[in-house]
Amino acid sequence: MDCLGFLDGQTTNPSLIAKNPELKEKLGSGEKLSSEDINNFYKKVVQEISAMIPQGSVSVEVYADANTAKDDMLNQAREMNTWIPNAHIKLPITKAGLEAAEILVGQGVRVNMTLCFSQEQGAAVYAATRGAEKGDVFLSPFIGRLDDRGENGMSFIESICQMFSSGDGHVELLAASIRNYEHLKYCLALGVDIATVPFKILKEWADDGLTIPAGNYSYDKRDMKDIPFEKVDLNKNWFKYNIQHDLTDAGLEKFVSDWNSLITK
């Protein structure tokens, strides 16, 4: 990242690993890979990334679908957390994922709660990880996937920022699924804690002088429909919130499908 002068972290997930050129070459040559082989390859990639950014964070995702049990997630999370010293373990916002997160943060494991599409999901993450230190918990709302169905994903980011403004700050907002420079610019204007951004867009920002837009930045939502802000109480127990969302379910199915497509023996 010479054009930027920094790289603070890297996120990974099963779909991204499935696109890895080295892995695609192995499969293309006819090499047969087991689930253990794929997991070992994932570990190697994560360790290579970690060595490049030892002061940063690398998010590593457990294999989970909507039915994966808490104990299975815990076993994976604890193992993955031994791979590198700078991991955030990615868990889905499901009942089991939140149960696992509550236990893990109490044991000093850092987490990244992924596939967030509603304020109640965000509030549940806040409640399940209450007491964690700042930097230990990321929340990843996905902007582009809301845009894809005509909903203004940036209005959701606005709402999450507003909702968390009344909290203690222990959950950091990691804006994910950024698809264009306008997404990034508005995240910067809103003061979002972290953003996971494709290289092409980061380079566009660098070429623009790494400008930080003013707080009154006007985001063009085009013809997309705003997602209304909901007044959500952050002080309830996490299991009191409605955490179901069809895009979370679809995202989990996609990750599992991409991972399983790599297993050939």
Image (cartoon, grey):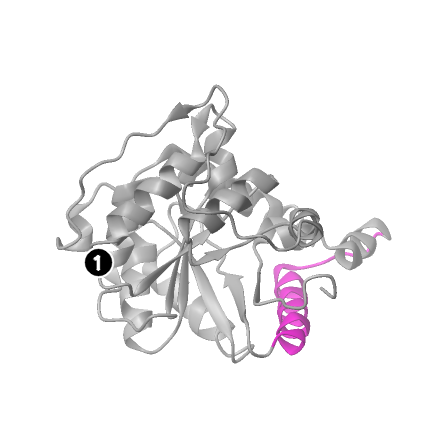
Q: Where is residue 214 drawn, in percent x and y? A: 46, 47
Q: Where is residue 124 drawn, in percent x and y? A: 25, 52
Task: Report whether 264 appears left or right of 113.
Answer: right
Q: Nearer the viewer, residue 167 or 258?
A: 167
- Can residue 9 be seen in the rendering of this structure? yes
Task: Report whether 39 appears left or right of 105.
Answer: right
Q: For the C terminus, which image quadrant?
A: bottom right
Q: Name the residue rendered at 48%, 50% in the picture.
A: 188
SS of the residue under disc 1: loop
Q: Is residue 45 magenta?
A: yes
How crowded is the residue under tag 1: few (<14 C-alpha within 10 Å), some, or many (20+)?
some
Q: Name the residue rendered at 65%, 61% in the picture.
A: 38
Q: For the N terminus, which image quadrant?
A: bottom right
- Can residue 177 be seen in the rendering of this structure? no
Q: Where is residue 215 drawn, in percent x and y? A: 41, 46
Q: Nearer the viewer, residue 184 or 116?
A: 184
Q: Is residue 200 magenta?
A: no
Badge 1 amino acid: Gly
Task: Specify the principal SS of the magenta part.
Answer: helix
Q: Name the residue rendered at 62%, 59% in the picture.
A: 35
The stretch of residues the image draws in magenta is 30-53
Q: Where is residue 179 drawn, in percent x and y? A: 59, 39
Q: Which residue is mark 1?
A: 167
